[in-house]
Image: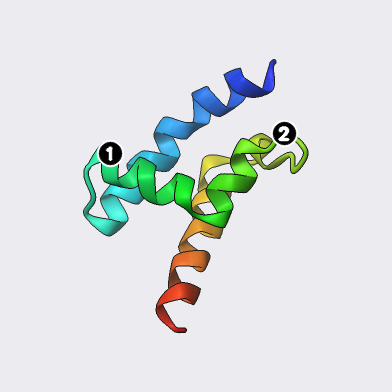
């Protein structure tokens, strides 16, 4: 499967998790995800992050958000 197809397949689940956890609408969740380091890595074919499970990727995102809040 092509990288873009894989990303398109799992992105909705990641965004649903972000929406549910952080009480964001879809646009806000997408913006928040793609502005994060996790979102940048997810978009980069070189990292291979797109090959991980949506829950794993959400977990990385969640850790990043928590870390930013504690700075």
- For mark 1, does the 10 Å Cα neighbourhood hold few (<14), some (14 to 19), or many (20 or more) residues? few
Q: Position of residue 64 (x, y in %)?
A: 51, 66
Q: Position of residue 56 (x, y in %)?
A: 57, 50
Q: Residue at x 51, y 23 (%)?
A: 9
Q: Nearer the viewer, residue 21 or 36?
A: 36
Q: Nearer the viewer, residue 50 or 55?
A: 50
Q: Residue at x 68, y 35 (%)?
A: 51
Label 1: which residue?
Answer: 27
Q: Nearer the viewer, residue 67 or 13?
A: 67
Pick whichever of labels 1 and 2 is earlier in the sequence. 1
Mark 2 element type: loop
Asked whether residue 52 appears in the rendered view, the answer is yes
Q: Residue furthest right?
A: 46
Q: Residue at x 28, y 38 (%)?
A: 27
Looking at the rendering, which quadrant does residue 37 occupy?
Answer: bottom right
Label 2: which residue?
Answer: 45
CA gap, disc 1 and disc 2: 23 Å
Q: Residue furthest bottom?
A: 71
Q: Residue at x 33, y 46 (%)?
A: 29
- For mark 2, does the 10 Å Cα neighbourhood hold few (<14), some (14 to 19), or many (20 or more) residues? few
């Amino acid at each position: 499967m092509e990288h873009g197809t894989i990303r398109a397949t799992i992105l909705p689940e990641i965004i649903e998790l972000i929406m549910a956890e952080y009480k964001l609408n879809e646009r806000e969740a997408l913006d928040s995800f793609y502005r994060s380091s996790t979102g940048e890595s997810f978009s980069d074919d070189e990292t291979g992050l797109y090959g991980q499970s949506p829950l794993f990727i959400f977990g990385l995102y969640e850790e990043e958000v928590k870390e930013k809040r504690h700075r």
